[in-house]
Image (cartoon, rainbow, N blue to C red):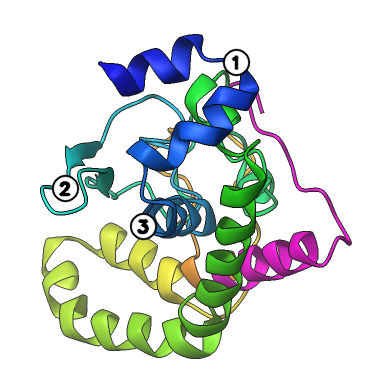
Amino acid sequence: MEFAKLISHADDAEFAQRLGEFLDYDAFARFLGALTLIASYDGFLSNGQNFYAYLDPQSNKFGFIPWDLDHAWGNFPRVGTAGTRERASIWHPWVGENRFLERVLAVEEFRKIYRERLEELLTTRFNPERLNPRIDAIATSIRSAISAESTFRLARFEEAVSEKVLPRWRGDPFDPGRAGHQLKQFIVNRSRSVRNQLDGKTKGMILDWSR
């Protein structure tokens, strides 16, 4: 309740001064940075679901855990397009209004740590050299099971894991016959966009429910 009151009622100076009493900056920067990198818009960054908040008994600060990430990796058609999700802003990663994230990302001390965690994740975790072999390994393990379901599902699966860049679907994003979401293409384009935003070359797209 005290944290909620701080978020809702404190002025900017008090909020910046006291935020660290409630929030583990490093842990939250990793959580937010990871969700931002994988453009996960069916949860914390948009509709307020698919995460847990908990009070750490050792630090007595709040932590966050994501779950239900089937629409992560830029694959949530209710928000934007594949292209805009790849270019989504790292400094305004939320959709619509989010007073909590807006206030947290206005705190300079947190922004510094958040940037450091984004740099770290982009270098060590979120890059094609690391992720593509993992996609290939998983694809090899599950391909036969998907093939047993139907030729249609197998075709969509092969599109999703292919390195060949295919034309993007321009029709209804919920059409069951739509083209597969290409994971490797997303990783390449998203990592490039985040790199350019960190370097100040682009600002990124601020997404809303209409684009």
Q: Is residue 198 magenta?
A: yes
**Three-letter code, disc 2:** Asp
* Numbered disc total: 3
Task: Say whether residue 186 is left or right of residue 50.
Answer: right
Specify the label residue 141 is tagged with.
Answer: none
The residue mark sitting in front, 2 or 1, is 1
Residues rendered magenta in the picture = 187-211
Distance from Cα at disc 2 to Cα at disc 1? 26 Å
Callout 1: few (<14), some (14-19), or many (20+) C-alpha neighbours within 10 Å?
few
**What label does residue 56 carry, if any?**
2
Calculate the distance from the C-alpha at mark 3 to the C-alpha at mark 2: 11 Å
- Residue 11's disc is 1
Q: Quadrant of the C terminus?
A: top right
Mark closer to the observer (3, 1): 1
Q: Amino acid at mark 3?
A: Ala
Is disc 3 placed on a helix, strand or loop? helix
Q: Which residue does the numbered mark 3 point to in the structure image? A: 27
The type of residue carrying mark 1 is: Asp
Give the quarter of the image for residue 64.
top left
Q: Is residue 62 above or below residue 155?
A: above
Q: CA distance from mark 3 to mark 1?
A: 24 Å
